[in-house]
Image (cartoon, grey):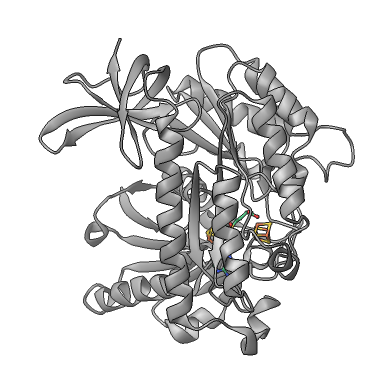
Amino acid sequence: MKKVYIETMGCQMNKSDTERMLGMLSYFGYEETKNPEQADLLIVNTCSIRQLSEDKAFSQLGVWGKWKQSKPALKIGIAGCVAQQKAKSIFKRAPYVDFVLGTHKIYALPEIIEKISKGEKICECTETNTTEDEQAVKYDIKRVKGVNAWIPITEGCNNFCTYCIVPYTRGRERSRLPETIIKEAKDALNTGFKEITLLGQNVDSYGKDFKDRNYRLADLLRELNAIEGKFRIRFVTSYPTDITDELIKTVVELDKVCEYFHIPMQSGSSEVLKAMNRRYDRETYAGIVAKVREMVPDVTITSDFIAGFPGETEEQFQQTLSAIDEFELDYSNLAAYSPREKTVAAKWVDKFIPEDIKNERFQRLNKKVQENCLKSNLKYVGREMEVLIENFYDHKGKMINTGKTRNFKTVHIPCDKDLTGEFVNVKITGTKTWYLQGDFT
Ligand code: SAH
Ligand code: SF4
Ligand code: F3S
């Protein structure tokens, strides 16, 4: 068998695409290797959310390009968001690349492999306005072993936030068919996965594009919840204003759907939000978070924020700091603004914030996120919680099991037995900044 190595960068969407590519390739005589030096085929599955991610992709290609000099039969491909965005131009910058595979057509991979084996160079980056459901059901998915299976339910995005490249790399929003999603969920559960996470740039706008049916995220959750067996269901990412009352009610009603919402706010300032083309202001976001907290007991709410968006004043930045406190956000992913090709904000060069100020704001945000994470963890000390064990390893000389509560808190449990994949009840005995400490009751 030939060997393939895939280096995956970026978000869960890419991780899911990698699993699909590995699945497909296994039908065509390739098995995965974890050692790139042993591979006959190398693929880098790329992210272009920030300049740094894009640079990482090209430096990876550079390293592999050198290997090709002593191993001419080696084939090198680039997939993912950088591939979609840069397309053919990649051959100029990295002439040793054999194929460029965009995000819309990953199921073209087998055909591409055949062509490159004959010495052709292929670029498949045509945008489509359909999903690849029909192709997807033909192949198994080679999921990374673990307890959590990721299932994309929508692809693309229609929002065009002024900083964001995703609508250009993933195209317009397309919902995958419920039938395909339910099949993938059942397959994953049958092979031992204990948690299903539904993925989408705006998971809560799922189904808006269906012309032949009235079927939304809440309906999908209901159908998935009805599958037999003990498992959990999560969904990310929620666009704030697409969270409907029905969705919140459904989360409360359904026993397998967990008390967790990822609702990126991006900035605490209404003016900055407007410049970002987010379709809500601070007050609207506040109202949504308050409603979710009121209706869903013990809910964890996490967010994303950007530091140093073009034109952001110190005062506006401070509104982001205060938002994290005021809305008691349990955790937030942070990024310093990075200008991206084609996006609207990238043209506001005269409003760019100097790197040192952006970084300094990032650090202050980071401190705030840490404080709040600890504060929110403290609420659970002394409580009994159900944990799904995800991992077993040596932590500073002691064997521990780590896992997640329903509300997405990480828990460390000292125990010599590997309990990966089991649901256990533990008493929360203490907390660190990023995780709770638990013991069996
Ligand atoms: N669809 C999700 C976000 C997907 S992108 C949403 O709308 O919330 C993931 C995160 O990357 C974003 O939430 C944002 O915080 C960050 N991001 C996107 N573009 C960025 C840029 N140009 N610079 C810095 N961070 C960026
Ligand atoms: Fe990007 Fe905005 Fe779409 Fe999220 S909603 S993927 S931030 S354009
Ligand atoms: Fe990156 Fe593309 Fe995901 S830009 S964050 S890999 S959708």
Residue 68 seen in the current view: yes
Q: Residue at x 51, y 70 (%)?
A: 50
- Pick whichever, 187 or 413, lies toward us: 413
- In this rendering, is residue 354 above or below 306? below
- In this rendering, is residue 212 above or below 314? above
- In this rendering, is residue 96 above or below 431? below
Q: In the displayed structure, does residue 379 sit left or right of residue 266?
A: left
Q: Position of residue 175 (x, y in %)?
A: 73, 44
Q: Residue at x 67, y 84 (%)?
A: 348
Q: In the displayed structure, does residue 250 sit left or right of residue 350?
A: right
Q: Given the current orientation, which residue lies at the most extreme left position?
A: 397
Q: Residue at x 42, y 75 (%)?
A: 55
Q: Position of residue 102 (x, y in %)?
A: 58, 64
- In this rendering, is residue 432 above or below 437? below
- The quarter of the rendering in which ligand 2 is drawn is bottom right
In the rendered image, the quadrant that contains the C terminus is top left
Residue 87 seen in the current view: no
Q: Residue at x 43, y 39 (%)?
A: 375
Callout count:
0
Q: Position of residue 300 (x, y in %)?
A: 54, 34
Q: Position of residue 440 (x, y in %)?
A: 28, 13
Q: In the displayed structure, does residue 274 sit left or right of residue 184?
A: right
- Pick whichever, 94 or 265, lies toward us: 265
Q: In the displayed structure, does residue 336 sit left or right of residue 320?
A: left
Q: Given the current orientation, which residue lies at the most extreme bottom position?
A: 350
Q: Given the current orientation, which residue lies at the most extreme right position?
A: 212
Residue 423: quadrant of the picture: top left
